[in-house]
Amino acid sequence: MSSAPPTAGTPLGRAPAPLLRRILLQGKYETVTMIRNGEQLILAIILPLLALVGLTVTPLLDGLGSSRINTAVPGILALCAMSTAFTGQGIATGFDRRYGVLRFLSTTPLGRAGLILGKVLAVLAVLLLQVLVVAAVALPLGWRPSAPGLLPGLLLLVLGAAAFTALGLLVAGTVRPEATLAITNLLWILLGALGGIVIPAERLPALAQAIVHFLPSGALGQALRDAFLHGSVNLAAVFVLLLWTAIAGAAATRWFKWN
């Protein structure tokens, strides 16, 4: 009596693991890869902490909140989201695409949807680590966020990460990896300095003030400041973030190239 033929596309006839387990394993792999990458670690942790200390010891944010640290932390958390979701994930995805990793994984039982969800999980895991590290440094320095704004602020941080992840995947999936590296790093510098993410719009040049509220960086920075400083939800900023997420997500879905 002959045995049943092996399942197509699986080794030794074994059925693939359940989709949720595949996504969790991919998310774990992506997370560990991001944490072990020295350049990613500098971008995700070291530079935001240096910016936090710099804003705390200089008078740049004086008069915008109850203290320098209270005004600085929301912007630093927004910067963390941009660092991981846009710059870090964009560069990693761009080079995965160059070396054929994306094309290979998209043909496995993980599938394209599972691969993207795994990357989303990795972004959220690293973002959680960033929040814990920033809080561990900021609380001893006197950070006292508004209690009613804690949950809305964290949810807004996730929404901002979604918008920047969509933008990162759009860039990584449409241009060459070298161009992805240049574009994401350049935008990280420009948006971090003049995009309203760390420095509030009222302290920026007049030309920048006119446009930062419509950028994902400015919307996320202001939304987090309103939440953590005043315990309020900036609905206009939420709308801007949702719009960027929807448009960038749709564009990435339409034009993303897997090889």
Image (cartoon, rainbow, N blue to C red):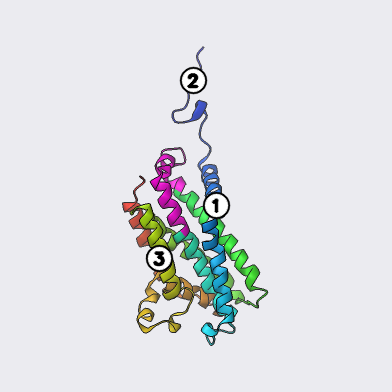
Residues tagged 2 and 1 counted as in contact (Cβ below 8 A): no
* Secondary structure state at the residue bearing disc 1: helix
The residue that label 3 is drawn on is: 186
Choose between 143 and 151: the one closer to the eye. 143
| Residue nearest the observer in this picture, 30 or 249 | 30
Camera-side mark, 1 or 3: 3
Residue at the (62%, 69%) spot, across then down: 135
Label ID, residue 56: none
Residue tagged by mark 1?
31
Amino acid type shown at disc 2? Ala
Q: Indicate the secondary structure of the residue bearing disc 2.
A: loop
Left or right of 172 in this view: 44: right
Q: Is residue 178 visible from the viewing direction of this image?
A: yes
Q: Residue at the location (59% across, 83% down)?
A: 67
Range shown magenta: 88-115
Pinpoint residue 60: horizontal percent, then vertical percent. 52, 83
For marks 3 and 2, give the CA distance.
56 Å
Residue 99 is inside the magenta segment:
yes
Mark 3: amino acid:
Leu
Q: Position of residue 238 (x, y in %)?
A: 44, 70
Mark 1 closeness class: few <14, some 14–19, many ≥20 residues within 10 Å: many
Q: Magenta region's main secondary structure?
A: helix
Q: Amino acid at mark 1?
A: Thr
Asked whether the viewer can see residue 124, the reply is: no
Q: Are marks 3 and 2 in contact (CB under 8 Å)?
A: no
131 above or below 141?
A: above
Q: Quadrant where the C terminus lies?
A: top left
Q: Which residue is mark 2?
A: 4
**Mark 2 or 1, nearer chain start:** 2
Helix, strand or loop under label 3 = helix
